Amino acid sequence: MSRRWWWPLSLLCLLAFAGDHAGWSGTAVFVTAALGTVPAAALLGEATEQIAVGITGREMARQESRGQPIRATTLGAKVGGLLNATFGNVPELFVGLLALHQGYITLTKATIAGSVIGNAALVLGLSLFFGGLRNGTQRFDAREAGHHAVLMALAVAALVLPSLFAARTAGGHVDEISIFAASLLLLIYAAYLLFSIFQLRGGRGKNQDKTFIEEEAEVVRDLSQILSHWPLRLSVLVVAGATLLVFASSEALVDTVKPFTHSFGWSPFFVGIVVVPLFGNMAEQSSAILLAYRNRMNTALGVASGSSIQVAVFVVPVLVFASLLSHSLTLVFNPIEIAVLALVVVIFFFVSQDGESNWLEGLQLIVLYAMAAAVFFFVPGQLR
């Protein structure tokens, strides 16, 4: 989709919001909201990238004025990278919060799992596939990718362990375990920010290993060489406007998911785990594919894995604690979600080991996602 169409098409979010409150057909509102989420999320993603580019540009200009070596991965660039990673998951966060408010627990949990699976399997698979077709065998830093795999495994473990506990017991203390796991995830997230942004690496020597936030900063640097630059003030205004549009489309999606699923015969579980993340992650998909197509595999991997990690260590704890104010959300998932999450982590680990990728590995990830989506389609589920 050409960028010039993002602006008018994003207004579909407002149309869906108006239709939701005007009593339009639930199916029409849901489809309109889903279609509007794509350009709105893309606008949000590009505007946060532009803010990060602006922060990076000012930081680098300050370095140049002081006669210092010009480096992109400075504090300013890392803050920009954090913004880029955080706002990329705004659609999932809004859908989760609004679904919680209405008591749609199945939809909330499915959106969480679907975002992690979609980014680590579909987005990465598409990146490897198109990047491999264009460039042949592509190489990346296996050590950095391995760090992502370890953090992803830790984050997924926090989603899986409460489920295994509930399966082996009568389900008592699941709420307490979920809150404890969410607290630990936030602790890990805070520690990761200190490690990656504020360089609290320990010891006297400088650790050169990169974190996913630092790679997000490199994503910003690489994208700044591809995209035209916006004024910083315009970028901030677009972020604010696009955030409101995404919120409007998310509210319309959640309000009409019941009539939509009834009309098509789809389960709320399938809508949450496949449909919502597919539309909400379009911005990450386009950025990762563009970077891989231009043979920037380190940064493409950073987009795919970083977004999954961000969902697990930031969005999930926020939703768990937000549920204390409305309907309780536990980190207990069904066996199919657990199995696919585990498969995705294992396959991501093996893909990252040799530091090389090709289009066949990408196709295999896409096929894995397609098989999982086919299974999810036939899994029954209620909204509550």
Image: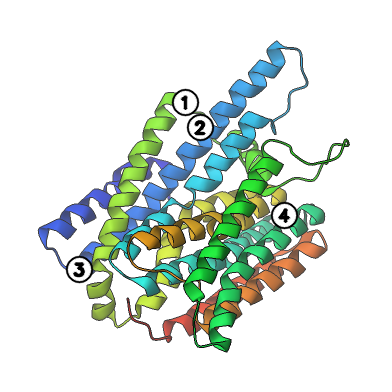
Q: Tell me, for residue 26, which label it has, or none.
A: 3
Query: For the residues marked 1 and 4, what is the alpha-carbon distance in whole angstroms?
Result: 34 Å
Q: Is residue 265 above or below residue 4?
A: below
Q: Are marks 2 and 1 in contact (CB under 8 Å)?
A: yes
Query: For the residues marked 2 and 1, what is the alpha-carbon distance in whole angstroms?
Result: 6 Å
Nearer the N terminus, badge 2 or badge 4? Answer: 2
Q: Amino acid at mark 1?
A: Leu
Q: Amino acid at mark 4?
A: Asn
Mark 2 neighbour class, 10 Å CA radius: few under 14, some 14 to 19, many 20 or more: many
Residue indicated by mark 4 = 135
Q: Which residue extends farthest right?
A: 205
Q: Amino acid at mark 3?
A: Gly
Colour scheme in use: rainbow
Could you say which is closer to the camera, residue 131 or residue 27?
27
Query: For the residues marked 1 and 3, what is the alpha-carbon distance in whole angstroms?
Result: 38 Å
Mark 3 neighbour class, 10 Å CA radius: few under 14, some 14 to 19, many 20 or more: many
Label 3: which secondary element: helix
Mark 1 neighbour class, 10 Å CA radius: few under 14, some 14 to 19, many 20 or more: some
Label 2: which secondary element: helix
**Which residue shows up at 56% across the image and 75% down it?**
162
Residue indicated by mark 1 = 232
Could you say which is closer to the camera, residue 76 or residue 325?
325
Residue indicated by mark 2 = 51
Nearer the N terminus, badge 2 or badge 3? Answer: 3
Q: x and y percent of residue 281 in the render?
A: 48, 57
Q: Are marks 2 and 3 in contact (CB under 8 Å)?
A: no
Q: Splitting the image into 4 quarters, where does residue 249 fall?
A: bottom left
Q: Amino acid at mark 2?
A: Ile
Q: Are marks 1 and 4 in contact (CB under 8 Å)?
A: no
